[in-house]
Amino acid sequence: QVQLVESGGGLVQPGGSLSLSCAASGSIVSIGAMGWYRQAPGKQRELVAAITSGGNTNYADAVKGRFTISRDNAKKMVYLQMNSLKPEDTAVYYCNADVRRLTGRYNTWGQGTQVTVSS
């Protein structure tokens, strides 16, 4: 069994900052790419940012320059630092990871954490 557990969501005013964390646990051989997705009410889930095991990153245009993704391979964690938050960043944020186990390769999701940007 593999789990991804997010933390760090909450309510923040426009222009504020939040930091999200995601911890992977279970029988893991290695983790490939990790990423953050978000889903706002009535909208499809979309990629926010992703990072390879080697540290290469890519970002959605809407968050470039404001969000930073990072990871700690030893701790099996991925982070998302969100600055200059806007109301349109309001969504449930999901952690995603390409997890390699002895039994195969699994695209794994966390349960999500709510981020609300509002005054």
Image (cartoon, helix red, strand yellow):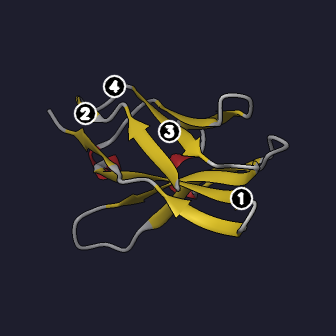
Instruction: Locate residue 45: give its quadrant.
Output: bottom left
Q: Report the front residue among 65 and 77.
A: 77
> Residue 105's spot in the image, x, y percent?
71, 67
Of circles 1 and 4, the one toward us is 1
Spatial separation of the CA atoms under disc 1 and disc 4: 38 Å
Spatial separation of the CA atoms under disc 4 and disc 3: 20 Å
Of circles 2 and 3, the one toward us is 3
Q: Which amino acid lies under the numbered mark 4 shown in the image of this protein?
A: Gly
Instruction: Of the two numbered discs 4 and 3 on the same chain, state the one appearing first in sequence.
Output: 4
Q: Answer yes or no: do the residues labelled 1 and 2 have beta carbons within 8 Å? A: no
Q: Quick one: SS at disc 2? A: strand
Of circles 4 and 3, the one toward us is 3
Instruction: Locate residue 20: give its quadrant.
Output: top left
Q: Which amino acid lies under the numbered mark 1 shown in the image of this protein?
A: Arg
Name which residue lies at 43% across and 53% down: 110
In the picture as drawn, the residue positioned furthest to the right comes out as: 54
101 in relation to 55, above or below: below
Q: Mark 4 = which residue?
A: 16
Q: Which amino acid lies under the numbered mark 3 shown in the image of this protein?
A: Cys
Instruction: Of the two numbered discs 4 and 2 on the same chain, state the one appearing first in sequence.
Output: 2
Q: Which amino acid lies under the numbered mark 2 shown in the image of this protein?
A: Gly
The 10 Å Cα crowd at callout 4, few under 14, some 14 to 19, many 20 or more, is: some
What number is the disc on residue 59? none
The 10 Å Cα crowd at callout 1, few under 14, some 14 to 19, many 20 or more, is: some
Q: Report the front residue among 66 and 2.
A: 2
Name which residue lies at 34% across and 25% down: 16
Q: Mark 2 = which residue?
A: 10
> Residue 86's spot in the image, x, y percent?
33, 41
Of circles 1 and 3, the one toward us is 1
Q: Mark 1 = which residue?
A: 101
The 10 Å Cα crowd at callout 2, few under 14, some 14 to 19, many 20 or more, is: some
Q: Quick one: SS at disc 4? A: loop
